[in-house]
Image (tube, grey):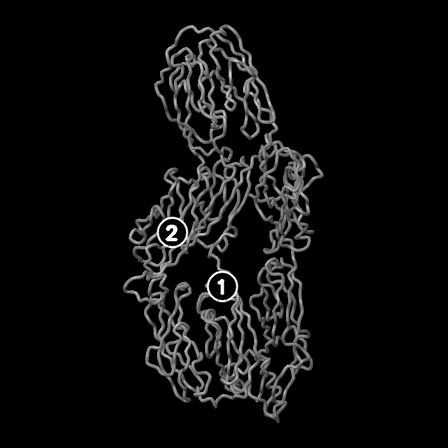
């Protein structure tokens, strides 16, 4: 007889014809050694119990880390180390990106490495003797030890059968520096030098010089400097707001890699120049000349002085030299007679006018010629006292909106004076004496949607001398905002037992406070008897159900601008038949128990657990499984919530007990409408019942060898992903003496143990509820599990569950926001950028779902299958300097939608030239690159080194943030 020590962990591959010869050896695997047993010590294994390696993170797949060398001394078998392989090499952690080539005995890389995700791996390699060589050893020593009744094989302590491997991942420069912000907006005072106007911070996940960041500026170096080490930005030269009101400062972050230096324009600093009062107001004319009739009444307005200040503040004050004839409105500049001029016929009046902005002043002169009144004229008769006009918001300053004389069919010569009557309210319009109303301020940034203009026409010799026409000017907003979904894509799960009136709400927002959106279901004719929606609130109701899954498109409409946005609702309807639980075990559950005497502490203690499950997707925090014993039973009781069964009477040996357990699903009352037919309990049954027969065989306690003891308490750590399916086996518990029957009982608080089940007889630890329900409560669970093989001695294993959240959408973009800047003069069909989806599927398409403002709507196109974005119109005439596109990736087969936001910033090349003289160009107009066509995938090959040179200072050179566009 041959006995093998448990350290061998033999992996037997015994041919069928000799199974019977060795069955006795296997059965007696852990029998106690007899007095005439001879122990054979085998001197073979690793010559060290630990070692370490350094591996670059850009190593190719199938890179050989090392060859495992086995050493031996006086081993009974001849071993050719190159050809013979006595062992299986077992890695204790299969999650590491390494494997053992069992033929070559080498450690190989099987998954690409990323040091920034994990910088070292530790695992253990254990030797397991192959059954072929185990039988050879048995034959050799059985022949040599003819007088020995049994042989016991054991490893000696000279070599090691386990080796602890540590692999350190060496860094390469594979990460581009990234700033904390892609965009940031600050304000800078005009004509002022300031230090530390902003502090840039970037990160580079690489190590050492590869992760050491230097900062520099792409442009505006004549105005700003940046500390290359700290990222502090200083203003070194005053900026005139009237020349540069706004600028974009691009910050370059570069690492200091030796073989390869990576850099990027990691941040754009939006700088608004804050105006100071540094400009002198300028009059529209050098001097003003008026011819006034002597019979004009007092307080007649006969003219207006108008000055322009390039500073942003509109605070001009007009004043006039003291005189007896004319006064001026201090804000509008209107000139008014103090007294009539009948005694000043054929005389001249010269007056000086001053304008001030609070700091600067300027002067002009008024020349008034008083002429004799000749005859009385007819009053001004108007064919239309009021009318409407509509103008576009994008009209440039200086545009003539309307000519009053032409519209009213009046001769210009018949009107002596025309003006706009308004109080101190600032309006963006003015009128000249030719009757033309002009736009004098941009309408884009103004909040008013319309203006009323009161136009006064004056004929001095008429009685009455004034007539009025009122013009209502409506501003047509050309670049209005579209409504936006709060959630573009929602996924909800509902149960057909729930009869709530409202399933969910779809909500979208409008930029305009006075607009109420209207909601409707697109193509609702298909689902008209299934869903309804409240047009005002967006609440959705379920009327009836036919199938399990629906993907609804809900339209939120802005009626005033006649634009809309689509929001998507994915509804998963759970039918009642899906709520029927399924028992974890077969049609009959057979259990072996040890007899329970009257003084046993095991009475009314947990013995074993009955488990029924739902499909993983069906579970909800308001659903639970309930259990009960359905036939009369005086020996056992069951916990209705957990399924744990305990004995309440003495269990006699050599007796079989039979009963049945039923399981059913219950729902919490919050999900059920209160009605007179419902019970008043918190839970309500929502499924039919399933039954499991239980057969318990009671064994006498004297068959147990009470002398067998167990190991001390041990700890097992398990990393459990939140996406792990219900019913998955997490581990199988076994401790020493496992040739004997062992029983496993879980103890601990029910709040956590209700998520797990331990098989009473096999030790399999099984997940029985979705673990993501606990993510907001805890991320570590400790499960104490008692193990016994004699019901006298108990050993406790602590299983520590580490919950790891890996719950992500089936498809998703790697970023929620993407940013890119382009020149506005790029040609049509220029490739702007390419968006890629994580975990893409076949038959899925990219689409531009919506835009922020209407003028962005037809400027861009995305290829449905590649995600390539191009411009399909010129950007020269676009009012927007920034465009926001919502991009979706829709998979019809799996009813999934992923979305992201693309921010496109439009740059003006001419403006950039005016803003800086520090422009750069490539060192060459063309580059020729020759390379082999057999480049290995997963290995970087540096083909060319691009460099930019300053046009004014040739010694200045920088690395570009270049992109291959074609």
Question: In which image quadrant can residue 479 be found?
Answer: top left
In the rendered image, is residue 923 in sight?
no
Q: Nearer the viewer, residue 17 or 406?
A: 406
Q: Nearer the viewer, residue 496 or 433?
A: 433
Residue found at x 52% / y 48% = 817
- The residue lying furthest to the right in this view is 955
Residue denoted by label 2: 505
What whole-number distance in Å separates the C-alpha atoms at marks 2 and 1? 27 Å
- The vertical placement of 72 against 895, above or below, is below
Residue found at x 40% / y 6% = 375
Where is residue 61 shown, x and y percent of the image?
59, 61
Q: Quadrant of the C terminus?
A: top right
- The vertical placement of 179 against 271, above or below, is below
Tell me whether circle 2 and circle 1 mark residues in contact (CB < 8 Å): no
Q: Is residue 175 left or right of residue 897?
A: right
Mark toward the start of the polypeptide (2 vs 1): 2
Per the image, label 2 sits on a secondary structure element best described as: strand
Residue denoted by label 1: 777
Where is residue 490 shown, x and y percent of the image?
42, 53
Q: Residues within 10 Å of mark 2 (few under 14, many from 20)?
A: some
Q: Residues within 10 Å of mark 1 (few under 14, many from 20)?
A: few
- The residue lying furthest to the left in this view is 677
Per the image, label 1 sits on a secondary structure element best described as: loop
Q: Quadrant of the N terminus?
A: bottom right
């Amino acid at each position: 007889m041959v006995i093998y020590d448990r350290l061998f962990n033999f992996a037997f591959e015994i041919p069928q014809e000799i199974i019977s010869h060795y069955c006795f050896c296997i059965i007696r695997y852990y029998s106690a050694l007899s007095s005439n047993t001879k122990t054979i010590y085998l001197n073979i294994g690793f010559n060290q119990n630990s070692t370490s390696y350094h591996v670059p993170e850009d190593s190719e797949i199938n890179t050989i880390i090392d060859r495992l060398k086995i050493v031996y001394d006086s081993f009974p078998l001849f071993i050719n180390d190159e050809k013979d392989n006595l062992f299986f090499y077992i890695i204790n952690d299969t999650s590491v990106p390494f494997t053992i080539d069992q033929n070559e005995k080498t450690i190989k890389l099987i998954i690409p490495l990323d040091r920034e995700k994990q910088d070292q791996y530790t695992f253990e390699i254990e030797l397991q003797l192959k059954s072929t060589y185990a039988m050879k050893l048995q034959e050799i020593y059985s022949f040599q030890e003819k007088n020995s009744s049994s042989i016991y094989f054991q490893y000696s302590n000279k070599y090691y059968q386990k080796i602890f491997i540590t692999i350190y991942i060496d860094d390469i420069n594979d990460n581009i520096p990234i700033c904390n912000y892609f965009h940031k907006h600050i304000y800078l005072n005009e004509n002022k030098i300031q230090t530390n106007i902003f502090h840039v911070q970037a990160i580079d996940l690489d190590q050492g010089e590869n992760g050491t960041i230097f900062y520099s500026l792409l442009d505006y170096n004549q105005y700003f400097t940046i500390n290359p080490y700290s990222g502090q930005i200083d203003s070194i030269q005053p900026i005139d707001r009237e020349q540069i009101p706004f600028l974009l400062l691009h910050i370059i972050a570069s690492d200091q890699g030796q073989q390869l230096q990576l850099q990027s324009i990691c941040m754009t600093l939006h700088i608004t120049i804050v105006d100071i009062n540094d400009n002198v107001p300028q009059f529209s004319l050098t001097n003003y000349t008026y011819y006034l009739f002597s019979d004009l009444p007092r307080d007649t307005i006969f003219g207006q002085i108008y000055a322009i200040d390039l500073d942003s503040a509109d605070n001009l004050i007009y004043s006039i030299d003291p005189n007896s004839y004319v006064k001026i409105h201090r804000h509008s500049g209107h000139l008014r007679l103090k007294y009539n001029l009948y005694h000043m016929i054929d005389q001249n009046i010269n007056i000086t006018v001053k304008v001030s902005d609070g700091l600067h002043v300027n002067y002009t002169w008024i020349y008034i010629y008083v002429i004799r009144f000749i005859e009385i004229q007819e009053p001004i008769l108007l064919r239309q006292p009021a009318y409407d006009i509509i103008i576009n918001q994008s009209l440039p300053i200086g545009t003539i909106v309307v000519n009053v004389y032409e519209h009213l069919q009046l001769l210009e010569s018949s009107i002596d004076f025309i003006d706009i009557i308004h109080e101190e309210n600032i309006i963006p319009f003015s009128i000249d004496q030719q009757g033309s109303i002009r736009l004098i301020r941009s309408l884009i940034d103004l909040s008013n949607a319309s203006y009323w203009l009161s136009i006064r026409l004056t004929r001095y010799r008429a009685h009455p001398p004034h007539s009025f026409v009122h013009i209502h000017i409506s501003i047509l907003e050309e670049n209005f905002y579209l409504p936006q979904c709060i959630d573009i894509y929602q996924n909800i799960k509902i149960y057909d037992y729930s009869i709530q009136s409202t399933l969910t709400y779809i909500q979208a927002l409008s930029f305009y406070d006075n607009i109420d959106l209207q909601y409707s279901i697109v193509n609702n004719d298909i689902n008209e008897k299934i869903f309804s929606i409240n047009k005002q609130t967006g609440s959705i109701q379920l009327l009836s159900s036919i199938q399990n899954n629906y993907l609804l498109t809900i339209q939120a409409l802005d009626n005033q601008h006649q634009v809309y946005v689509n929001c998507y609702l994915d509804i998963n309807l759970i039918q009642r038949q899906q709520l029927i639980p399924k028992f974890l075990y077969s049609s009959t559950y057979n259990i072996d128990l040890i007899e329970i005497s009257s003084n046993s502490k095991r009475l009314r203690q947990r013995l074993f657990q009955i488990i029924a499950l739902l499909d993983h997707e069906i579970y909800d925090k308001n659903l639970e499984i309930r259990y009960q014993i359905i036939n009369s039973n005086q020996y056992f009781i069951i916990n209705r919530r957990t399924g744990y069964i305990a004995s309440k009477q003495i269990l006699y040996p050599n007796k079989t007990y039979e009963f049945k357990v039923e399981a059913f699903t219950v729902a919490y009352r919050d999900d059920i409408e209160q009605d007179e037919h419902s019970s008043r309990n918190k839970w309500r049954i929502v499924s039919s019942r399933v039954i499991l027969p239980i057969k318990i065989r009671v064994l006498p306690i004297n068959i147990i060898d009470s002398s067998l003891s167990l190991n001390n308490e041990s700890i097992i750590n398990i990393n459990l992903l939140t996406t792990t399916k219900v019913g998955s086996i997490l581990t199988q518990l076994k401790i020493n003496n496992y040739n004997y029957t062992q029983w496993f009982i879980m103890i601990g608080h029910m709040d956590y143990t209700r998520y797990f089940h331990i098989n009473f007889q096999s030790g399999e630890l099984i997940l029985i509820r979705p673990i993501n329900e606990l993510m907001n409560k805890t991320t570590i669970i400790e499960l104490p599990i008692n193990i016994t093989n004699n019901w006298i001695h108990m050993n406790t294993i602590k299983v520590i569950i580490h919950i790891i959240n890996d719950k992500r959408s089936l498809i998703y973009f790697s970023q929620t926001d993407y940013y890119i800047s382009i020149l506005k003069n790029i040609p049509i069909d220029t490739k702007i950028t390419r968006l890629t989806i994580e975990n893409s599927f076949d038959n899925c398409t990219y689409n531009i779902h919506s835009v922020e403002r209407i003028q962005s709507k037809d400027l861009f196109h995305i290829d449905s299958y590649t995600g390539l974005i191009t411009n399909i119109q010129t950007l020269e005439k676009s009012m927007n300097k920034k465009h926001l596109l919502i991009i979706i990736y829709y998979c019809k087969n799996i009813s999934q939608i992923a979305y992201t936001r693309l921010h496109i910033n439009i740059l003006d090349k001419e403006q950039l030239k005016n803003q800086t003289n520090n422009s750069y160009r490539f060192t060459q107009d063309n580059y020729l690159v020759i390379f082999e066509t057999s480049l290995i995938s997963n290995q970087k090959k540096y083909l060319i080194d691009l460099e930019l040179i300053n046009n004014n200072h040739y010694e200045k050179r920088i690395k570009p943030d270049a992109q291959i566009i074609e």
